[in-house]
Image (spheres, rainbow, N blue to C red):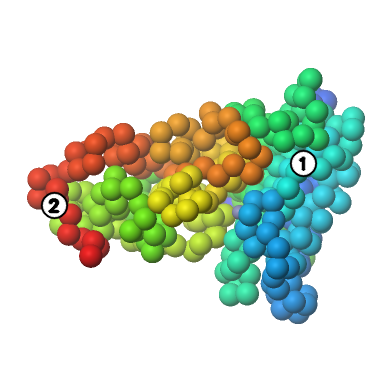
């Protein structure tokens, strides 16, 4: 049973962290403002169809190239408006082609995915907001794509809010990971667990199996070996999970462990998978590393990747460190070699 310390709210936690440090205070203010915006989004999401035809498509694509829904736009606007009260020079969002200027004097940059998994909204499955706070870099126009094309290692804070049966925020200020839960009555986030660690042992993996035929052989080999279960080279049975809502998958992994994969595949436009480096992979990577886990593109830690485009996609694998490193070993080896017994070198499973 985890220790519940629900007397400490987010603002008290942020205040304690900032102490008298002016730069920390700016990050703290920005986190607080984002948390408030997420509280509003939570209320909106909770209304479901009562809030109107929010799941309706706008018939347009967002900056990230995904179909845009009314609700995506509303969440984006909520965050953008809220950030006017924070020392933020510019905002990059999945919902906007280019960075948007806010406070010209601001020292920080924020990147967000306002509503991750929004295609699930009609089915009442968990969706989420992901955010990344970075320093404004001297000599680079903050209201430019370049300002955000920096390694995730530079992030000062990152987190997500998952709108599920309860609303949870998982946050790092670069000093471990904390789990907060929104009390809808008091309209505040309360600390539930400090120093969150990704559980190391879990026999769960999350991947979109319907793309099996599009994967590289080495990804197939890795998945085949898990599906072979007790009879395979891993000698244990695994369970598969697939929510198709990345934040919800990440949250399950923080709570219960496991691994998530969205590899690149051979479909047109999917060579680098479908997730975005700047506002999805980088913040998740920061959270993972701060909780003892790992997030990589199959080779390099996502925090060490420098984006070449604002909306760049990246293959993404995250979860417990040992599990991600295992995938990396499969990927670096020639197909069929890594940890494979001769028995399994002839792949029959799931192949037509
Ligand atoms: Zn997303």
Q: Residues within 10 Å of mark 1 (few under 14, many from 20)?
A: many
* Location of the C terminus (image quadrant): bottom left
First of labels 2, 1 by sequence position = 1
Question: Which mark identifies residue 346?
Answer: 2
Q: Residue at x 73, y 68 (%)?
A: 58
Q: Position of residue 39 (x, y in %)?
A: 76, 58
State whether residue 122 is above or below residue 213.
Answer: below
For label 1, the residue is: 99
State whether residue 299 is above or below residue 33.
Answer: above
Q: Position of residue 291 (x, y in %)?
A: 51, 38
Picture quadrant where residue 137 is located: top right
Disc 2 to disc 1, C-alpha distance: 50 Å
Q: Nearer the viewer, residue 300 or 228?
A: 300
Q: Nearer the viewer, residue 133 or 165?
A: 133
State whether residue 262 is above or below residue 87.
Answer: below
- On the rendered structure, is 220 left or right of 121? left
Q: Residue at x 64, y 62 (%)?
A: 67
């Amino acid at each position: 049973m985890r220790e519940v310390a629900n007397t400490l709210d987010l603002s008290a936690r942020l205040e304690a962290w900032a102490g008298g440090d002016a730069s920390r205070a700016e990050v703290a203010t920005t986190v607080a403002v984002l948390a408030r915006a997420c509280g509003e989004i939570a209320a909106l999401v909770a209304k479901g169809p009562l809030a109107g035809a929010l799941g309706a498509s706008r018939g347009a694509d967002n900056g990230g190239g995904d179909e845009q829904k009314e609700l995506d736009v509303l969440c984006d606007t909520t965050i953008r408006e809220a950030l006017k009260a924070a020392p933020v020079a510019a905002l990059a969002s999945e919902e906007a082609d280019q960075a948007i200027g806010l406070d010209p004097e601001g020292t920080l940059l924020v990147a967000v995915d306002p509503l991750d998994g929004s295609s699930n909204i009609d089915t009442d499955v968990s969706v989420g907001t992901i955010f990344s706070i970075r320093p404004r870099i001297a000599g680079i126009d903050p209201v430019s794509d370049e300002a955000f094309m920096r390694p995730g290692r530079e992030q000062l804070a990152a987190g997500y809010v998952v709108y599920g049966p309860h609303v949870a925020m998982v946050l790092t200020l670069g000093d471990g990971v904390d789990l907060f839960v929104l009390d809808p009555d008091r309209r505040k986030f309360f600390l539930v667990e400090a120093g969150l660690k990704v559980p190391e042992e879990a026999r769960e993996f999350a991947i979109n199996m319907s793309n099996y035929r599009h994967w590289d052989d080495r990804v197939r080999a890795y998945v085949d070996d898990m599906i072979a279960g007790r009879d395979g080279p891993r000698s244990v049975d695994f369970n598969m999970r697939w929510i198709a809502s990345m934040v919800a998958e990440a949250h399950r992994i923080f709570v219960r462990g496991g691994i998530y994969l969205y590899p690149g595949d051979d479909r047109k436009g999917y060579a680098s998978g479908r997730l975005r480096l700047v506002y999805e992979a980088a913040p998740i990577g920061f959270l993972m590393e701060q909780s003892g886990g790992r997030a990589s593109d199959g080779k390099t830690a996502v925090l060490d990747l420098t984006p070449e485009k604002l909306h760049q996609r990246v293959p993404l694998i995250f979860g417990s460190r040992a599990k991600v490193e295992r995938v990396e070993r499969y990927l670096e080896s020639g197909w069929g070699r890594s940890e494979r017994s001769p028995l399994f070198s002839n792949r029959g499973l799931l192949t037509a």
